[in-house]
Amino acid sequence: MTINPATNPSASEYPQTAQTTARRHRERISYDAGKVHALLDELYYCHAVIAHAQPGPMAMPLFHARVGETLYMHGSTGAGSFLNARDGKVAMSVTATSIDGLVYSRSWFHHSANYRSVIIFGQAQLVSDPEEKWDSFVALVDRLGPGRSGDSRSPSKKELAQTSVLKLSMDAVSYKERNAGVGEDPDDLDLPHWAGVVPLRLQAGEPSPAPGVTTEAPAYVKELHTV
Amino acid sequence: MTINPATNPSASEYPQTAQTTARRHRERISYDAGKVHALLDELYYCHAVIAHAQPGPMAMPLFHARVGETLYMHGSTGAGSFLNARDGKVAMSVTATSIDGLVYSRSWFHHSANYRSVIIFGQAQLVSDPEEKWDSFVALVDRLGPGRSGDSRSPSKKELAQTSVLKLSMDAVSYKERNAGVGEDPDDLDLPHWAGVVPLRLQAGEPSPAPGVTTEAPAYVKELHTV
Protein backbone atom coordinates (compact mmCIF):
# COMPACT_ATOMS: atom_id res chain seq x y z
CA MET A 1 0.00 0.00 0.00
CA THR A 2 1.31 3.42 -0.91
CA ILE A 3 0.37 6.53 0.99
CA ASN A 4 0.78 9.86 -0.79
CA PRO A 5 2.66 12.67 1.01
CA ALA A 6 0.20 15.01 -0.69
CA THR A 7 -2.61 13.53 1.38
CA ASN A 8 -0.64 12.19 4.34
CA PRO A 9 2.29 14.38 5.42
CA SER A 10 3.89 11.57 7.42
CA ALA A 11 4.33 9.46 4.27
CA SER A 12 7.77 9.56 2.71
CA GLU A 13 7.03 8.21 -0.76
CA TYR A 14 4.76 9.27 -3.59
CA PRO A 15 2.72 6.43 -5.08
CA GLN A 16 3.87 5.15 -8.44
CA THR A 17 1.25 5.97 -11.07
CA ALA A 18 0.94 5.36 -14.80
CA GLN A 19 2.17 8.93 -15.34
CA THR A 20 5.26 8.49 -13.21
CA THR A 21 6.38 5.03 -14.31
CA ALA A 22 9.73 5.23 -16.11
CA ARG A 23 9.97 3.63 -19.52
CA ARG A 24 13.76 3.74 -19.55
CA HIS A 25 16.52 3.87 -16.92
CA ARG A 26 14.21 2.55 -14.22
CA GLU A 27 17.18 2.37 -11.87
CA ARG A 28 17.33 6.17 -11.91
CA ILE A 29 13.78 6.80 -10.70
CA SER A 30 12.63 7.38 -7.15
CA TYR A 31 9.44 8.45 -5.40
CA ASP A 32 11.17 9.65 -2.26
CA ALA A 33 9.47 12.81 -0.96
CA GLY A 34 12.65 13.99 0.75
CA LYS A 35 14.60 14.01 -2.51
CA VAL A 36 11.75 15.72 -4.35
CA HIS A 37 11.46 18.43 -1.70
CA ALA A 38 15.20 19.03 -1.53
CA LEU A 39 15.50 19.57 -5.29
CA LEU A 40 12.45 21.85 -5.53
CA ASP A 41 13.74 23.88 -2.59
CA GLU A 42 17.18 24.24 -4.17
CA LEU A 43 16.11 25.29 -7.67
CA TYR A 44 14.84 28.80 -8.35
CA TYR A 45 12.61 27.98 -11.29
CA CYS A 46 10.75 25.19 -12.98
CA HIS A 47 9.15 24.64 -16.38
CA ALA A 48 5.35 24.41 -16.29
CA VAL A 49 3.26 22.87 -19.07
CA ILE A 50 -0.48 23.45 -19.36
CA ALA A 51 -2.01 20.49 -21.15
CA HIS A 52 -4.68 22.34 -23.10
CA ALA A 53 -2.90 25.63 -23.76
CA GLN A 54 -3.38 27.34 -27.09
CA PRO A 55 -1.73 27.43 -29.62
CA GLY A 56 -0.10 24.33 -28.17
CA PRO A 57 1.56 23.11 -25.01
CA MET A 58 4.87 24.73 -24.20
CA ALA A 59 7.17 24.77 -21.19
CA MET A 60 7.08 28.11 -19.40
CA PRO A 61 9.91 28.98 -17.02
CA LEU A 62 8.34 30.09 -13.72
CA PHE A 63 9.76 31.06 -10.32
CA HIS A 64 8.39 28.66 -7.69
CA ALA A 65 8.11 28.01 -3.96
CA ARG A 66 7.04 24.74 -2.37
CA VAL A 67 4.85 24.74 0.74
CA GLY A 68 4.19 21.19 1.90
CA GLU A 69 2.75 19.35 -1.09
CA THR A 70 1.70 22.47 -2.97
CA LEU A 71 3.87 24.22 -5.52
CA TYR A 72 3.23 27.96 -5.87
CA MET A 73 4.39 29.70 -9.01
CA HIS A 74 4.56 33.32 -9.96
CA GLY A 75 1.85 33.25 -12.59
CA SER A 76 1.86 36.65 -14.24
CA THR A 77 2.52 35.04 -17.57
CA GLY A 78 0.19 33.72 -20.20
CA ALA A 79 -0.64 30.98 -17.71
CA GLY A 80 -2.48 33.39 -15.46
CA SER A 81 -4.74 34.78 -18.12
CA PHE A 82 -5.30 31.31 -19.49
CA LEU A 83 -6.45 29.98 -16.13
CA ASN A 84 -8.57 33.06 -15.55
CA ALA A 85 -10.33 32.39 -18.80
CA ARG A 86 -10.99 28.80 -17.80
CA ASP A 87 -12.20 29.92 -14.38
CA GLY A 88 -11.16 26.75 -12.65
CA LYS A 89 -8.68 23.95 -12.48
CA VAL A 90 -6.55 22.75 -15.32
CA ALA A 91 -4.20 19.79 -15.77
CA MET A 92 -0.58 20.87 -15.48
CA SER A 93 2.80 19.22 -15.33
CA VAL A 94 5.93 20.78 -13.92
CA THR A 95 9.53 19.74 -14.52
CA ALA A 96 12.42 21.08 -12.46
CA THR A 97 15.91 20.07 -13.53
CA SER A 98 19.48 20.56 -12.41
CA ILE A 99 22.42 19.59 -14.60
CA ASP A 100 25.16 18.45 -12.26
CA GLY A 101 27.95 17.22 -14.47
CA LEU A 102 29.28 16.34 -17.91
CA VAL A 103 30.36 12.73 -18.35
CA TYR A 104 33.18 12.07 -20.84
CA SER A 105 33.54 8.44 -21.85
CA ARG A 106 36.11 6.73 -24.05
CA SER A 107 33.30 6.05 -26.54
CA TRP A 108 30.73 8.42 -28.08
CA PHE A 109 28.00 6.08 -26.95
CA HIS A 110 28.63 6.43 -23.22
CA HIS A 111 28.94 10.21 -23.05
CA SER A 112 26.30 11.39 -20.64
CA ALA A 113 25.30 13.98 -18.08
CA ASN A 114 24.71 13.86 -14.36
CA TYR A 115 21.44 15.49 -13.42
CA ARG A 116 18.53 15.57 -11.01
CA SER A 117 14.98 16.13 -12.19
CA VAL A 118 11.50 16.20 -10.67
CA ILE A 119 8.31 15.78 -12.68
CA ILE A 120 4.95 16.62 -11.13
CA PHE A 121 1.48 16.01 -12.55
CA GLY A 122 -1.45 17.70 -10.90
CA GLN A 123 -4.26 20.20 -11.04
CA ALA A 124 -3.37 23.88 -11.24
CA GLN A 125 -5.47 26.87 -10.36
CA LEU A 126 -5.07 30.52 -9.53
CA VAL A 127 -4.85 31.31 -5.83
CA SER A 128 -7.96 33.32 -4.96
CA ASP A 129 -8.24 33.09 -1.16
CA PRO A 130 -6.70 36.35 0.17
CA GLU A 131 -4.91 34.73 3.10
CA GLU A 132 -3.46 31.93 0.98
CA LYS A 133 -2.41 34.47 -1.63
CA TRP A 134 -0.57 36.52 0.98
CA ASP A 135 1.15 33.45 2.41
CA SER A 136 2.18 32.21 -1.02
CA PHE A 137 3.63 35.63 -1.82
CA VAL A 138 5.66 35.42 1.41
CA ALA A 139 6.90 31.97 0.39
CA LEU A 140 7.92 33.19 -3.08
CA VAL A 141 9.80 36.25 -1.75
CA ASP A 142 11.48 34.16 0.95
CA ARG A 143 12.94 31.89 -1.76
CA LEU A 144 15.42 34.72 -2.38
CA GLY A 145 16.54 34.48 1.25
CA PRO A 146 14.98 33.31 4.52
CA GLY A 147 13.18 36.30 6.01
CA ARG A 148 13.46 38.44 2.89
CA SER A 149 9.73 39.21 3.07
CA GLY A 150 10.40 40.94 6.42
CA ASP A 151 13.25 42.90 4.85
CA SER A 152 11.16 44.53 2.12
CA ARG A 153 7.87 46.38 1.80
CA SER A 154 4.77 44.20 1.67
CA PRO A 155 2.37 44.77 -1.22
CA SER A 156 -0.35 47.37 -1.50
CA LYS A 157 -3.88 46.29 -2.41
CA LYS A 158 -3.21 47.37 -5.98
CA GLU A 159 0.03 45.37 -6.20
CA LEU A 160 -1.68 42.31 -4.76
CA ALA A 161 -4.42 42.58 -7.34
CA GLN A 162 -1.80 42.83 -10.10
CA THR A 163 -0.05 39.66 -8.92
CA SER A 164 -1.34 36.25 -9.86
CA VAL A 165 -0.09 33.14 -8.14
CA LEU A 166 -0.61 29.66 -9.52
CA LYS A 167 -0.87 26.66 -7.24
CA LEU A 168 -0.28 23.08 -8.27
CA SER A 169 -1.25 20.11 -6.16
CA MET A 170 1.61 17.61 -6.24
CA ASP A 171 -0.59 14.59 -7.02
CA ALA A 172 1.77 12.34 -9.01
CA VAL A 173 5.45 12.96 -8.53
CA SER A 174 8.68 11.28 -9.54
CA TYR A 175 12.36 12.01 -9.16
CA LYS A 176 15.14 10.99 -11.52
CA GLU A 177 18.85 11.20 -10.95
CA ARG A 178 22.10 10.23 -12.58
CA ASN A 179 24.91 10.74 -10.11
CA ALA A 180 27.67 8.42 -11.20
CA GLY A 181 31.03 8.12 -12.84
CA VAL A 182 31.80 7.12 -16.40
CA GLY A 183 29.97 4.19 -17.92
CA GLU A 184 32.33 2.27 -20.18
CA ASP A 185 32.38 -0.75 -22.43
CA PRO A 186 35.01 -3.08 -20.90
CA ASP A 187 36.69 -3.40 -24.30
CA ASP A 188 37.32 0.35 -24.31
CA LEU A 189 39.23 0.60 -21.05
CA ASP A 190 42.61 0.46 -22.78
CA LEU A 191 41.82 3.22 -25.27
CA PRO A 192 44.10 6.25 -24.88
CA HIS A 193 41.26 8.79 -24.56
CA TRP A 194 40.70 10.94 -21.48
CA ALA A 195 37.55 10.00 -19.58
CA GLY A 196 36.03 11.55 -16.49
CA VAL A 197 33.37 13.79 -15.02
CA VAL A 198 33.28 17.59 -14.89
CA PRO A 199 30.92 18.73 -12.12
CA LEU A 200 28.61 21.66 -12.88
CA ARG A 201 26.97 23.95 -10.35
CA LEU A 202 24.91 27.11 -10.39
CA GLN A 203 27.00 29.62 -8.48
CA ALA A 204 26.32 33.12 -7.25
CA GLY A 205 28.68 35.98 -8.01
CA GLU A 206 29.36 39.12 -6.03
CA PRO A 207 26.14 40.98 -5.04
CA SER A 208 25.74 44.27 -6.89
CA PRO A 209 23.82 46.86 -4.81
CA ALA A 210 21.29 49.10 -6.54
CA PRO A 211 22.19 52.79 -6.90
CA GLY A 212 21.64 54.64 -3.63
CA VAL A 213 21.77 51.56 -1.43
CA THR A 214 24.01 52.21 1.56
CA THR A 215 22.96 49.41 3.93
CA GLU A 216 25.07 46.29 4.07
CA ALA A 217 23.82 43.25 2.17
CA PRO A 218 21.91 40.87 4.46
CA ALA A 219 23.52 37.57 5.45
CA TYR A 220 21.32 35.51 3.10
CA VAL A 221 22.62 37.54 0.16
CA LYS A 222 26.29 37.40 1.21
CA GLU A 223 26.07 33.66 1.87
CA LEU A 224 24.92 32.97 -1.68
CA HIS A 225 28.27 34.15 -2.96
CA THR A 226 30.36 32.01 -0.65
CA VAL A 227 28.36 28.83 -1.22
CA MET B 1 8.43 41.26 -44.95
CA THR B 2 10.04 38.76 -42.66
CA ILE B 3 12.40 36.10 -43.86
CA ASN B 4 12.90 33.07 -41.66
CA PRO B 5 16.48 31.97 -40.88
CA ALA B 6 15.11 28.42 -40.98
CA THR B 7 14.46 28.81 -44.70
CA ASN B 8 16.96 31.55 -45.54
CA PRO B 9 20.26 31.31 -43.68
CA SER B 10 21.18 34.90 -44.47
CA ALA B 11 18.17 36.22 -42.55
CA SER B 12 18.86 37.41 -39.03
CA GLU B 13 15.35 37.43 -37.58
CA TYR B 14 12.65 34.84 -37.12
CA PRO B 15 9.20 35.96 -38.23
CA GLN B 16 6.77 36.84 -35.47
CA THR B 17 3.93 34.31 -35.43
CA ALA B 18 0.82 33.85 -33.32
CA GLN B 19 2.74 31.27 -31.29
CA THR B 20 5.64 33.59 -30.58
CA THR B 21 3.80 36.81 -29.81
CA ALA B 22 4.31 37.83 -26.18
CA ARG B 23 1.23 38.53 -24.11
CA ARG B 24 3.21 40.22 -21.34
CA HIS B 25 6.55 42.00 -21.10
CA ARG B 26 6.69 42.66 -24.83
CA GLU B 27 9.82 44.73 -24.27
CA ARG B 28 11.66 41.55 -23.30
CA ILE B 29 11.00 39.60 -26.48
CA SER B 30 13.23 39.36 -29.54
CA TYR B 31 13.36 37.34 -32.74
CA ASP B 32 17.07 37.83 -33.31
CA ALA B 33 18.62 34.63 -34.68
CA GLY B 34 22.05 35.52 -33.27
CA LYS B 35 20.71 35.69 -29.70
CA VAL B 36 18.75 32.47 -30.16
CA HIS B 37 21.77 30.62 -31.52
CA ALA B 38 24.10 31.92 -28.79
CA LEU B 39 21.80 30.77 -25.97
CA LEU B 40 21.15 27.33 -27.50
CA ASP B 41 24.88 26.86 -28.06
CA GLU B 42 25.68 27.83 -24.46
CA LEU B 43 23.11 25.65 -22.69
CA TYR B 44 23.63 21.91 -22.36
CA TYR B 45 20.00 20.89 -22.21
CA CYS B 46 16.52 22.01 -23.05
CA HIS B 47 13.01 20.96 -22.08
CA ALA B 48 11.01 19.38 -24.91
CA VAL B 49 7.22 19.09 -24.92
CA ILE B 50 5.37 16.75 -27.28
CA ALA B 51 1.90 18.16 -27.84
CA HIS B 52 0.02 14.90 -28.06
CA ALA B 53 1.99 12.77 -25.63
CA GLN B 54 0.16 10.34 -23.40
CA PRO B 55 -0.77 10.48 -20.52
CA GLY B 56 -0.35 14.22 -21.01
CA PRO B 57 2.20 16.75 -22.17
CA MET B 58 5.25 17.11 -19.97
CA ALA B 59 8.59 18.83 -20.30
CA MET B 60 11.42 16.34 -20.79
CA PRO B 61 14.99 17.47 -20.13
CA LEU B 62 17.07 16.53 -23.19
CA PHE B 63 20.68 17.13 -24.20
CA HIS B 64 20.74 19.12 -27.44
CA ALA B 65 22.96 20.37 -30.26
CA ARG B 66 22.01 23.03 -32.81
CA VAL B 67 23.12 22.66 -36.43
CA GLY B 68 21.93 25.63 -38.46
CA GLU B 69 18.20 25.86 -37.93
CA THR B 70 17.78 22.29 -36.74
CA LEU B 71 17.89 21.25 -33.11
CA TYR B 72 19.07 17.69 -32.52
CA MET B 73 18.23 16.05 -29.21
CA HIS B 74 19.34 12.84 -27.66
CA GLY B 75 16.04 11.04 -27.84
CA SER B 76 16.48 7.76 -26.01
CA THR B 77 13.67 8.69 -23.67
CA GLY B 78 9.95 8.13 -23.89
CA ALA B 79 10.04 10.63 -26.73
CA GLY B 80 11.82 8.23 -29.03
CA SER B 81 9.42 5.36 -28.57
CA PHE B 82 6.50 7.74 -28.85
CA LEU B 83 7.71 9.06 -32.19
CA ASN B 84 8.50 5.58 -33.40
CA ALA B 85 4.96 4.58 -32.67
CA ARG B 86 3.63 7.53 -34.61
CA ASP B 87 5.97 6.79 -37.50
CA GLY B 88 6.29 10.38 -38.60
CA LYS B 89 6.36 13.97 -37.57
CA VAL B 90 4.83 15.37 -34.44
CA ALA B 91 4.31 18.91 -33.13
CA MET B 92 6.89 19.76 -30.49
CA SER B 93 7.95 22.80 -28.54
CA VAL B 94 11.29 23.28 -26.87
CA THR B 95 12.21 25.73 -24.13
CA ALA B 96 15.80 26.42 -23.12
CA THR B 97 16.34 28.69 -20.14
CA SER B 98 19.22 30.21 -18.20
CA ILE B 99 18.68 31.92 -14.86
CA ASP B 100 21.23 34.73 -14.71
CA GLY B 101 20.50 36.60 -11.50
CA LEU B 102 18.29 37.20 -8.50
CA VAL B 103 16.82 40.69 -8.24
CA TYR B 104 16.17 42.03 -4.73
CA SER B 105 13.91 45.06 -4.61
CA ARG B 106 12.85 47.23 -1.68
CA SER B 107 9.29 45.93 -2.23
CA TRP B 108 7.99 42.36 -2.51
CA PHE B 109 6.29 43.32 -5.74
CA HIS B 110 9.44 44.15 -7.69
CA HIS B 111 11.51 41.12 -6.73
CA SER B 112 12.44 39.39 -9.95
CA ALA B 113 15.00 37.28 -11.77
CA ASN B 114 17.32 37.96 -14.66
CA TYR B 115 17.09 35.23 -17.26
CA ARG B 116 17.37 34.31 -20.93
CA SER B 117 14.96 31.89 -22.57
CA VAL B 118 14.31 30.54 -26.06
CA ILE B 119 11.04 28.94 -27.11
CA ILE B 120 10.83 26.96 -30.35
CA PHE B 121 7.75 25.54 -32.04
CA GLY B 122 8.23 23.08 -34.85
CA GLN B 123 7.87 19.59 -36.20
CA ALA B 124 9.90 16.84 -34.61
CA GLN B 125 10.88 13.49 -36.02
CA LEU B 126 13.41 10.75 -35.45
CA VAL B 127 16.54 11.01 -37.58
CA SER B 128 16.52 8.01 -39.91
CA ASP B 129 19.00 8.93 -42.67
CA PRO B 130 22.27 7.18 -41.70
CA GLU B 131 24.52 10.08 -42.74
CA GLU B 132 22.43 12.67 -40.91
CA LYS B 133 22.29 10.42 -37.86
CA TRP B 134 26.07 10.13 -37.83
CA ASP B 135 26.53 13.88 -38.24
CA SER B 136 24.02 14.66 -35.50
CA PHE B 137 25.80 12.25 -33.17
CA VAL B 138 29.06 14.11 -33.90
CA ALA B 139 27.33 17.41 -33.11
CA LEU B 140 25.95 16.07 -29.82
CA VAL B 141 29.29 14.65 -28.65
CA ASP B 142 31.11 17.83 -29.70
CA ARG B 143 28.84 19.86 -27.38
CA LEU B 144 31.01 18.49 -24.55
CA GLY B 145 34.07 20.01 -26.22
CA PRO B 146 35.04 21.02 -29.75
CA GLY B 147 36.62 17.96 -31.34
CA ARG B 148 35.53 15.57 -28.60
CA SER B 149 34.13 13.18 -31.22
CA GLY B 150 37.67 12.77 -32.57
CA ASP B 151 38.95 12.09 -29.05
CA SER B 152 36.70 9.11 -28.39
CA ARG B 153 35.66 5.89 -30.10
CA SER B 154 32.95 6.25 -32.72
CA PRO B 155 29.91 3.99 -32.42
CA SER B 156 29.55 0.41 -33.60
CA LYS B 157 26.56 -0.54 -35.76
CA LYS B 158 24.87 -1.94 -32.69
CA GLU B 159 25.44 1.24 -30.67
CA LEU B 160 24.13 3.36 -33.53
CA ALA B 161 21.00 1.27 -33.73
CA GLN B 162 20.48 1.69 -29.98
CA THR B 163 20.73 5.47 -30.20
CA SER B 164 17.79 7.56 -31.27
CA VAL B 165 18.19 11.20 -32.21
CA LEU B 166 15.28 13.60 -32.45
CA LYS B 167 15.36 16.53 -34.83
CA LEU B 168 13.24 19.64 -34.53
CA SER B 169 12.86 22.18 -37.29
CA MET B 170 13.08 25.66 -35.76
CA ASP B 171 9.97 27.01 -37.48
CA ALA B 172 8.70 29.59 -35.00
CA VAL B 173 11.22 30.90 -32.53
CA SER B 174 11.34 33.64 -29.92
CA TYR B 175 13.85 34.84 -27.36
CA LYS B 176 13.10 36.49 -24.04
CA GLU B 177 15.51 38.21 -21.72
CA ARG B 178 15.55 40.21 -18.53
CA ASN B 179 18.99 41.66 -18.02
CA ALA B 180 18.52 44.69 -15.86
CA GLY B 181 18.93 46.16 -12.42
CA VAL B 182 16.31 46.57 -9.76
CA GLY B 183 12.87 47.87 -10.71
CA GLU B 184 11.57 50.11 -7.97
CA ASP B 185 8.54 52.20 -7.14
CA PRO B 186 9.90 55.79 -6.78
CA ASP B 187 8.16 56.09 -3.39
CA ASP B 188 10.26 53.17 -2.10
CA LEU B 189 13.68 54.61 -2.81
CA ASP B 190 14.11 55.95 0.71
CA LEU B 191 13.23 52.67 2.42
CA PRO B 192 16.11 51.25 4.46
CA HIS B 193 16.09 47.81 2.78
CA TRP B 194 19.02 46.40 0.84
CA ALA B 195 18.33 46.14 -2.88
CA GLY B 196 20.49 44.79 -5.67
CA VAL B 197 21.25 41.96 -8.03
CA VAL B 198 23.09 38.71 -7.33
CA PRO B 199 24.42 37.23 -10.60
CA LEU B 200 24.07 33.48 -11.10
CA ARG B 201 26.12 31.33 -13.43
CA LEU B 202 26.52 27.64 -14.18
CA GLN B 203 30.15 26.91 -13.37
CA ALA B 204 32.35 23.88 -13.88
CA GLY B 205 34.35 22.39 -11.05
CA GLU B 206 37.60 20.47 -11.16
CA PRO B 207 37.57 17.60 -13.70
CA SER B 208 37.57 14.19 -12.05
CA PRO B 209 39.33 11.55 -14.21
CA ALA B 210 37.84 8.06 -14.38
CA PRO B 211 39.80 5.23 -12.68
CA GLY B 212 42.74 4.15 -14.81
CA VAL B 213 42.93 7.34 -16.88
CA THR B 214 46.52 8.50 -17.09
CA THR B 215 46.36 10.93 -20.02
CA GLU B 216 46.07 14.61 -19.30
CA ALA B 217 42.62 16.18 -19.62
CA PRO B 218 42.16 17.82 -23.04
CA ALA B 219 42.12 21.62 -23.27
CA TYR B 220 38.35 21.81 -23.78
CA VAL B 221 37.86 20.02 -20.45
CA LYS B 222 40.42 22.11 -18.54
CA GLU B 223 39.02 25.35 -19.95
CA LEU B 224 35.56 24.61 -18.61
CA HIS B 225 36.91 24.89 -15.09
CA THR B 226 38.65 28.22 -15.58
CA VAL B 227 35.71 29.90 -17.31
Image (cartoon, coloured by chain):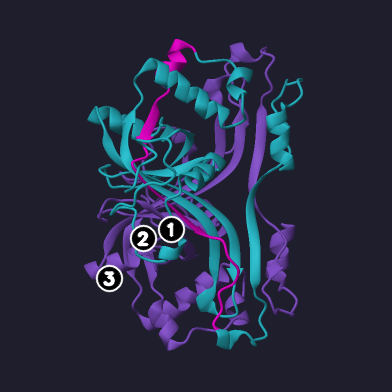
Chain colours: A purple, B cyan
Mark 1 vs 3: CB contact within 8 A = no
Q: Which mark is residue B29?
A: 1
* Side of A56 relative to A11 (left or right): left
Q: Residue at x 25, y 53 (%)?
A: A55
Assign a secondary structure to mark 2. loop
For disc 2, the chain is B
For disc 1, the chain is B
Assign a secondary structure to mark 1. strand
Residue B178 covered by magenta stretch: yes
Q: Amino acid at mark 3?
A: Asn
Q: Residue at x 27, y 61 (%)?
A: A90
Q: Are marks 2 and 1 on the same chain?
A: yes
Q: Residue at x 41, y 30 (%)?
A: B76
Assign a secondary structure to mark 3. helix
Residue B28 visible in rendering: yes
In this figure, which residue is indicated by the disc labeled 2? B22
Q: Within 10 angstroms of label 3, few (less than 14), some, or many (20 or more) residues?
A: some
The image quadrant of residue B167 is: top left
The span shown in magenta is B156-185
The image quadrant of residue A194 is: top right
